[in-house]
Amino acid sequence: MKQVLISGAAGFIGSHLCDKFLEEGFYVVGLDNFITGSPKNIEHLLERKKFEFIKHDITLPIKFHSKKIDLVLHFACPASPVDYLKFPLETMKVNSIGTLNMLEIAKKYNSKYIFASTSEVYGDPTVHPQTESYLGNVNPVGPRSVYDESKRFSEAISMSYFREYGLDTRIIRIFNTYGPRMKANDGRVVPNFITQALNMDNITVYGNGNQTRSFCYISDLIDGIFKITSADNLKGEIMNLGNPEEYNILDLAKIIIEKTSSKSQIIFKALPEDDPKQRCPEITKIKKLTKWQPETSLKEGIDLTIDYFKNHI
């Protein structure tokens, strides 16, 4: 039986990964310290015989007595602006010391190592859409740097292990993902708008609302991650993972108001520092290497996410 180790297992993406790998017959070991993850995201798994959970901060050493770990998935990290600005030092530690610790585990067991990077490594891009070869336009000392620069460091050290030790390292640059198990107070645009709309509060749009994002539904993302872990000949590859359909933020707000039949009004506030104006993945590479492509439309995914939030706020 194959065994996978997943850091950030109680997080939004991490918990869905636990579900997926259990469905695929893996023995799953999940790690999380609950700094931003929620025990509720994995409580349905705790009685599963093939699931083991360890509450642990991966910036601290940990030893495993397993004979083998086939896959190491490093997904632990505060991922929303609300969280990484609340926990700036913890964010930098998990993307430096934590990354090093997870790489050492992968090296010890000669595991495939999958690192969850982010579209934030591109910063406020001057190239559109963003390809994996684009080096980014990132402010190294701005408030968001605790997240985007630490993710860039994690990419650098992951590639160093690939070059120095031949470790099968694969880096996924994840673009805006949404769906069930996001927190209502997450701070990202989809849960923000849905929560405000369902509560009949004003919907807060930053800037003029013309900035764009590309939204990938969680089931599509998980399918893409699984394909990346399963495919051959991806050693050392860096891949964008997201839905290339692009929407401006104001249109997203209007879609959510319509779908929730909300009486909310749209109000505008100042754009946060270093907030990117455009964000859209070029996914030719991953489509070619894994045959993956997103299947869930924004309107379908928003319906599913609204249904979830109706029962969780």
Image: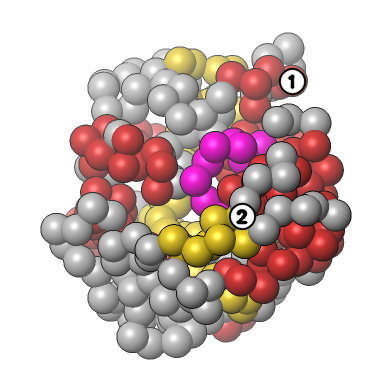
Residue 126: image location, x then y, percent? 33, 85
Q: Quick one: which residue is furthest to the top in this view? A: 47
- Rounded to the nearest angstrom, the CA distance separating label 1 from label 2 is 33 Å
Q: Can residue 92 be seen in this view?
A: yes
Question: Residue 298, how many percent across, how many down?
Answer: 75, 66
The quarter of the rendered structure image containing the N terminus is: top right
Residue 44: give its label.
1
User: Mark 1 packing: few (<14 Cα in 10 Å), some, or many (20+)?
Assistant: few
In this picture the colour scheme is secondary structure
Secondary structure predominantly adopted by residues drawn in magenta: loop
Q: Which residue is farthest bottom?
A: 127
Q: Is residue 186 magenta?
A: yes
Type of amino acid at the residue the image marks with label 2: Ile
Looking at the image, which residue is at 65% across and 21% down? 40
Residue 16 locus on image (x, y percent): 66, 39
Total marks shown come to: 2
x, y (%) of residue 37?
51, 29
The residue identified by callout 2 is 203
